[in-house]
Image: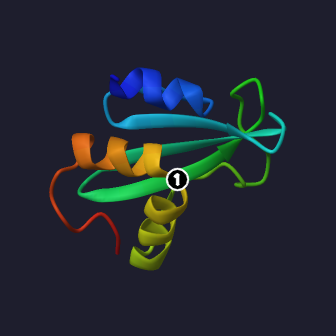
Amino acid sequence: MELSESLAQFGMTEREPGTLVVACVHNFVILEYRINAGLLWSRVLLPDGSEFLDGVSDWEALQLEEVLSLMRAKPPIAAWLRLRAPRPGLAR
């Protein structure tokens, strides 16, 4: 099974190589993950993809513990990370 098919089964899509979109909480919010500058970044968006006010949707670099926890809890995200960032060091 291709990565895009595996991601779709879990409500995830890759917007572009290096950016993953995850619908969650009954589509109440969208989590977006991006690999940039050797780090994994995340932000929270409204269901229509627009940003929350007051900096809630600002990009934040994930800590190592957060990346490891995410990879254990969400195998499709782990597969995406291995494909898009096959090198170690995706966290501060």
Say which residue appears at 45% left-offset and 43% top-offset. 76
Does residue 73 lie above or below 43 as drawn? below
Q: Nearer the viewer, residue 83 or 31?
A: 83
Tell me: 80 left or right of 86: right
Residue lying at 48% horizontally and 45% vertically, measured from the top left: 33
In the rendered image, which quarter contains the C terminus? bottom left
Residues 43 and 78: in front is 78
Q: Position of residue 27 (x, y in %)?
A: 80, 33
Q: Is residue 57 above or below residue 71?
A: above
Left or right position of 31 against 67: right
Q: Residue 84: horizontal and vertical position, in percent?
A: 25, 41
User: Disc 1 on helix, strand or loop?
Assistant: loop
Q: Is residue 1 visible?
A: yes
Q: Nearer the viewer, residue 75 or 52?
A: 75
Name the residue beneath numbered marker 1.
74
Q: Position of residue 39 (x, y in %)?
A: 32, 60
- Which residue lies at the image location 33% right of the left edge and 22% below the top edge? 2
Q: Which corner quadrant of the image does residue 65 belong to?
A: bottom left
Residue type (three-letter) at the residue carrying disc 1: Lys
Q: Is residue 51 above or below residue 42?
A: above
Q: Position of residue 60 (x, y in %)?
A: 52, 61
Residue 41: name its quadrant: bottom left
Q: How many marks?
A: 1
Residue found farthest to the front: 1
